[in-house]
Image (cartoon, grey):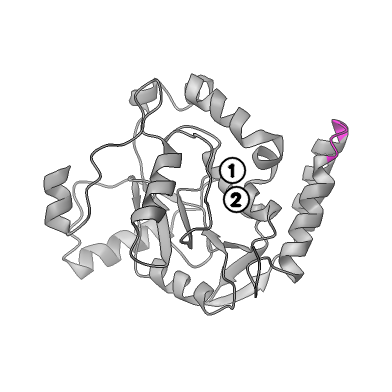
């Protein structure tokens, strides 16, 4: 790992906090990444994701707004990678991107990258990398704080390399792992219900940001929560609407 980092000119952090099962903590990656970052914008990207030039272009589009706090997320597209990919060969990269863009986006729950200003997450629960709920919490927490959440799925191709789940027995059984169950408990019901890309407050399409009025999703999510007589829905909905029209990331804030 250290040799690969040196070859790429990246910083290697050898001492990583882990769960009781020996899996690296997502919370450590986010907090330590912000602490060590030399730039004012940081990104977390899962290692099975391949991104292209449209990714930094999307970040640049969001930064044109006067927001001092914001979160950029998007859905991935699962694609089979046959052999290796030569990133030094523009034709190979372009061909693979075209194949990936032809694949339909995965579920709105499938979020594998997060971009945000440094310092936006001073505290993160002890979620575990590769387990469940941390991605829901990242979105739900931002929405509840009235921070603009931008879905860039329409303009960013995030290629998710097809792989097995032998490291956790199976994809279906991953949700039953202790680290996953603990993750859902840490995220809380609100984040688990509303931490999806279709609950974002903005969408980036064609380089233009537009407010997202998710009436259908709002009604469906409201029905789920009201059936349980859960008052948290109204907290979420008010925070979501506030984030659309009076973003906490615009102008001065705490």
Count of picture labels: 2
Residue named by callout 2 = 139
Q: Nearer the viewer, residue 38 or 152?
A: 38
**Pointer 2 local density, CA inside 10 Å: few below 14, some 14–19, many at least 20:** many
Q: Nearer the viewer, residue 82 or 20?
A: 20
Say whether residue 56 is visible.
yes
Q: Position of residue 154 (x, y in %)?
A: 53, 65
* Vertical relation: 106 (above or below) 59: above
Looking at the rendered image, the quarter that the C terminus falls into is bottom right
Q: Residue furthest front?
A: 254
Q: Would residue 86 appear left or right of 96 to someone viewing this image?
A: left
* Vertical relation: 64 (above or below) 4: below
Residue named by callout 1 = 136
Q: Residue at x 42, y 67 (%)?
A: 40
Q: Position of residue 19 (x, y in %)?
A: 40, 26
Q: Nearer the viewer, residue 57 or 14?
A: 14
Q: Position of residue 97 (x, y in %)?
A: 34, 62
Q: Residue at x 70, y 52 (%)?
A: 144
What span is colored magenta in the figure?
A: 227-231
């Amino acid at each position: 790992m250290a040799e690969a980092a040196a070859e790429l000119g990246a910083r290697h952090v050898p001492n990583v906090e882990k769960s009781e099962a020996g899996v690296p903590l997502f919370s450590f990656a986010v907090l330590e990444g912000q602490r060590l970052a030399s730039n004012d914008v940081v990104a977390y990207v899962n290692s099975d994701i391949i991104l292209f030039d449209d990714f930094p272009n999307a970040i640049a589009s969001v930064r044109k707004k006067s927001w001092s706090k914001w979160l950029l997320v998007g859905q991935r597209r699962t694609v089979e990678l046959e052999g290796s990919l030569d990133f030094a060969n523009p034709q190979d990269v372009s061909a693979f991107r075209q194949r990936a863009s032809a694949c339909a986006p995965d579920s709105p729950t499938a979020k594998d990258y997060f971009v945000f200003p440094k310092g936006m997450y001073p505290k993160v629960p002890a979620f575990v990398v590769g387990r469940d709920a941390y991605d829901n919490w990242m979105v739900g927490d931002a929405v509840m704080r009235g921070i603009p959440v931008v879905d860039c799925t329409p303009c960013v191709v995030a290629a998710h390399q097809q792989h097995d789940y032998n490291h956790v027995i199976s994809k279906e059984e991953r949700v039953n792992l202790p680290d996953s169950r603990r993750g859902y408990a840490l995220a809380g019901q609100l984040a688990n219900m509303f931490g999806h890309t279709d609950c974002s407050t903005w969408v980036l399409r064609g380089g233009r940001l537009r407010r997202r009025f998710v009436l259908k999703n709002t009604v469906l999510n409201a029905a789920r929560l009201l059936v349980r007589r859960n008052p948290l829905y109204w907290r979420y909905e008010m925070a979501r609407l506030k984030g659309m029209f009076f973003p906490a990331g615009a102008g001065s804030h705490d």
